[in-house]
Image (spheres, grey):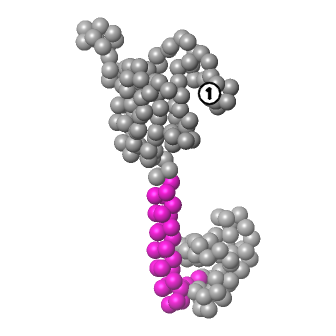
Amino acid sequence: MDRLDAMQLFVRVTELGSFSAVAQQMGVARSVVTRQIAALEAHLGAKLLARSTRRLSLTSAGTAYLEKCRVILNLVEAAETGIAEERQTPRGPIRVGAPLSYGLKRLSPLLLDFAEHYPEVTLDIDYNDRRVNLIEEGMDLAIRVTAKLDPATVARRIGTSRLIAVASPDYLARHARAGQGNSPD
């Protein structure tokens, strides 16, 4: 018996006031819900629900257990939500190697926007023109502008000799130059 599942089931039974309603909601037979609650009561060594043919009511042990179950289940939900939110927010260090001229001219302006959008990410940029070993130097990414790669290098081409500038409409609106769109005429 999974205790958290049993607690959730117990809370649902008390909220709906019926084994049948919970069973229908879960898409299982009523006997499945009844057995789960009976197993929980056996595990606890206490009757949680007083059952009659017409209704369910909490025993004193059931009332105390229900309060604690709600607190525990709320804490579990908050912990899981916190982890999910943390996973969705990029954070931590990123170490990048880039050629000096490319990095200063092309990459630096982009990194300022990146840092603004992702304040919990720390960027460590190593501007150099030498070949780097990502693993030995602890880098996450290296950008290299070259026509030839060493055959042992594992790389992914992200562009060709033709440069294409791409920007979102929001970026263009925020960074429009005089005489180019968004003019106050």
Residue 105 picture quarter: top left
Magenta stretch encompasses residue 72: yes
Taking the spot 62% from the left edge, 27% from the top edge, the residue there is: 156
Up the image or down, 135 lies above or below 19; here it is: above
- In the rendered image, residue 90, in percent from the top left (x then y), is placed at 46, 44
Taking the spot 53% from the left edge, 28% from the top edge, the residue there is: 131
Q: Is residue 150 visible?
A: yes
Up the image or down, 89 lies above or below 8; here it is: above
Q: Estimate how packed mark 1 is, as few (under 14), some (14 to 19) or many (20 or more) residues with alpha carbons within 10 Å.
A: few
Task: Name the residue nearer the viewer: 159 or 181.
Answer: 159
Q: Which residue is mark 1?
A: 156
- In the rendered image, residue 67, in percent from the top left (x then y), is placed at 47, 79
Q: Is residue 106 visible?
A: no
Up the image or down, 94 lies above or below 27; here it is: above
- In the rendered image, residue 121, in percent from the top left (x then y), is placed at 41, 43
Residue at the left extreme, as displayed:
184
Q: Quadrant of the N terminus?
A: bottom right
**Residue span colored magenta:** 56-84
